[in-house]
Amino acid sequence: MEHNDNRMLIMLGDGMSGRDVPSLGGRTTIEAANTPALDTVARLGASALMYVAGPGQPIGSDTSHMALLGYDPFAYYRGRGPLEARGVGIELQPGDVAFRCNFATIDERTRNVIDRRAGRPQFSTQPLCEAVAAACREEIDEAEVIFEASVEHRAALVLRGEGLDYRVTDVDPHEEGVPPAECRPVDGLSPEDEKRARKTAEIVNKFVAVAERVLPDHEINVKLREEGKPIINTVLPRGAGEAVALPPFSQTHEGLRGAMVVEVDLIRGLAAYADMDLIDVPGATGKRDTDELAIAAAVAESLERYDIILCNIKAPDLGGHDRDPEQKIEAIEKVDRAVGYLLDTLDWSRVVMMIGADHCTPVTVGNHTGDAVPVAFHGVGVRRDLVERYSEREAACGGVGQILGCDVLTVLRNFAGRIEKFGA
Ligand code: ZN
Ligand code: ZN
């Protein structure tokens, strides 16, 4: 292989892909959005359909990003909690059990969950975390409780102590209109593991009880009540896990230096475990108001220093979960503007880019589905195909065919001329 330093770029709209939407005349939100830049990438380059984990397998953002970085999620994944915890800056120690949590609103009388995301608070929930953690220090002595805020309704909980086990069930019922579930050991554990999991579950249930006692009278809720808004009165832990052991990215990809520009703590945590650099972008909020041009500028600037950058803009996924086609289309158009900036800025004789999504979040479903997502490659080495537009339907005719998430780095490295021949 002749040495070169061509650069590789993965640009993702989180959950950007979807299904046919009746109110959009049967088009997907990508098809309904105005996406001149994404279409240019498809027209100048080559498209493919991508099953990120495998045909029909719905996946989370964490497992999808593992696959896209070349780590088999079925082999490495140890639950979502540790990624969220690392993402908010908690250094996990061996034996720690980590959860991702939602702040939520429950009915004060029946305890039925009214809103699993507590109205997606647009302010910091760190004071709520501190109040709950302080009360836990007084009342829970079986383990140390670390509780830190992430964006919007999200937070991370870490239990640190002797004899814990991550194999416990979610408190989050994953639906509204029912009360939070009791945490208990998962089925099928050995008696020894079961004992540790039971201890862990009991601490989690205590933590939730403490939260429900402390939160209603917190000054943030006093203010929300005054404003006539729903209060934040419980915490729903889920996705228990233990620290992930990933080989460093540069080791699994022959010395390539990789970095991420990502908005979600969960994926930021993955960067930490994969030993990839994180590039912070002021104005990248992970929400609908994110500054997509600041993100694009940071990507362009970082490509000077890294062989490969992965960038994820979160907003489209939010519109999908909210089942709001207009919101999702607006977010897709944000991704388009970021890609447009890169088309104008980068030297495409020495950069190859893939645009795409990490999974589908159809507005007709409100959650992730296992349908294939459209991707398009553009830049150095790419053999142009006949596809004219970036969309689910057109990508099915793409020149790169059908790929899996774990193929992406191989495909990019081939275009870039940065992969060794197999055989003589
Ligand atoms: Zn995602
Ligand atoms: Zn999602």
Image (cartoon, grey):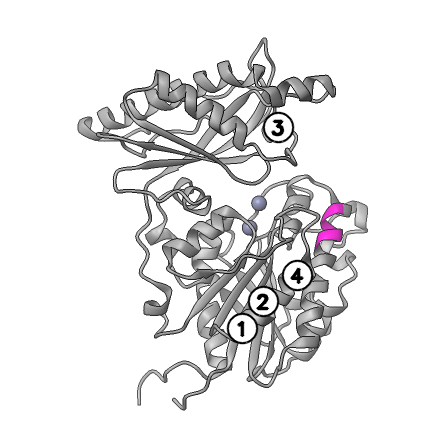
The disc, 3 or 4, on the residue closer to the chain's N-terminal end is: 3
Local crowd size for mark 3, using a 10 Å CA cut-off: few (<14), some (14–19), many (≥20): many
**Residue receiving disc 3:** 118
Mark linked to residue 294: 4
Mark 4 secondary-structure assignment: helix
SS of the residue at dot 1? loop
Mark in front: 3 vs 2: 2
- The image position of residue 387, as x and y in percent, is 69, 74
Give the residue at x 46% y 21%.
Answer: 181
Depth check: give the residue in front, 419 or 404.
419
Q: Residue drawn 57% across and 19% down?
A: 218
Question: How many angstroms separate mark 3 from mark 1 (CA)?
Answer: 38 Å
Sort mark 4 into few (<14), some (14-19) or many (20+) by Cα contacts within 10 Å: some
Q: Is tag 3's residue or tag 2's residue first in the polypeptide sequence?
A: 3
Q: Which residue is mark 1?
A: 303
As drawn, 296 above or below 111: below
Q: Main secondary structure of the magenta part?
A: helix
Residue at which label 2 appears: 299
